Image (tube, grey):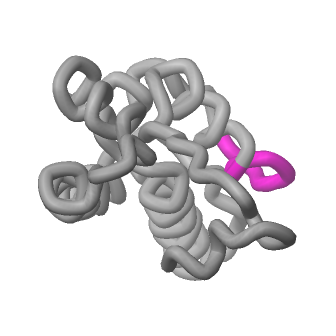
Amino acid sequence: DPALLRPGRLGQLLFVPPPDREARAHIIWHHLAGRPHGELDVWALADRSDGYSGADLRAVVESAVERALAASLQSGSVVPVGMGHLLAALGESRSSVGAWVDVASNVVTYSNTEGQYDDLAAWLRHGRR
């Protein structure tokens, strides 16, 4: 919305690309903090979640936690979140970034008249996964 760019409001656009491998691993750890979990290979999860947003990764972790909780209720004891829970949750999820890229591509093509989307255009040309 161009109104957000008026003086006294946000003032400028800032392009934040989807998280890279290291950021994805840290996002996963962040959402697991304070929850019982077994030994996890978050780097393997980060490798398998290329193109996922931070919100997508949060949803994956929440789904894995729900799986562990269901297993805990069934067994009568605490079942920590494990790689199996996370991999199953990841396997049933989809990245939301693909749809965003389609919209972003149209914005760059049809609305970049003043160069305000040049960073996004460069990412779409060179950094897009």
- Residue at left 38%, top 48%? 114
Indicate whether 79 appears above or below 46: below
Residue 44 is situated, as x and y percent measured from the top left of the image, at 39, 22
Q: Is residue 77 left or right of residue 99?
A: right
Residue 129 is situated, as x and y percent measured from the top left of the image, at 20, 30
Residue 95 appears in view: no
Q: Nearer the viewer, residue 5 or 85?
A: 5
Q: Is residue 93 left or right of residue 19?
A: left
- Residue at left 52%, top 33%? 24
Q: Is residue 26 left or right of residue 1?
A: right
- Residue at left 34%, top 23%? 47
Q: Nearer the viewer, residue 47 or 83?
A: 47
Residue 48 is situated, as x and y percent measured from the top left of the image, at 29, 31
Prevailing secondary structure class for the magenta stretch in the rendered image: loop
Q: Is residue 30 left or right of residue 102?
A: right
- Residue at left 53%, top 41%? 16
Residue 96 appears in view: yes
Indicate whether 22 appears above or below 53: above
Residue 66 is situated, as x and y percent measured from the top left of the image, at 53, 73
Q: Quadrant of residue 95?
A: bottom left
* Residue 46 colored in magenta in the image: no
In this picture, which residue range is highlighted in magenta? 31-37
Q: Nearer the viewer, residue 126 or 31?
A: 126
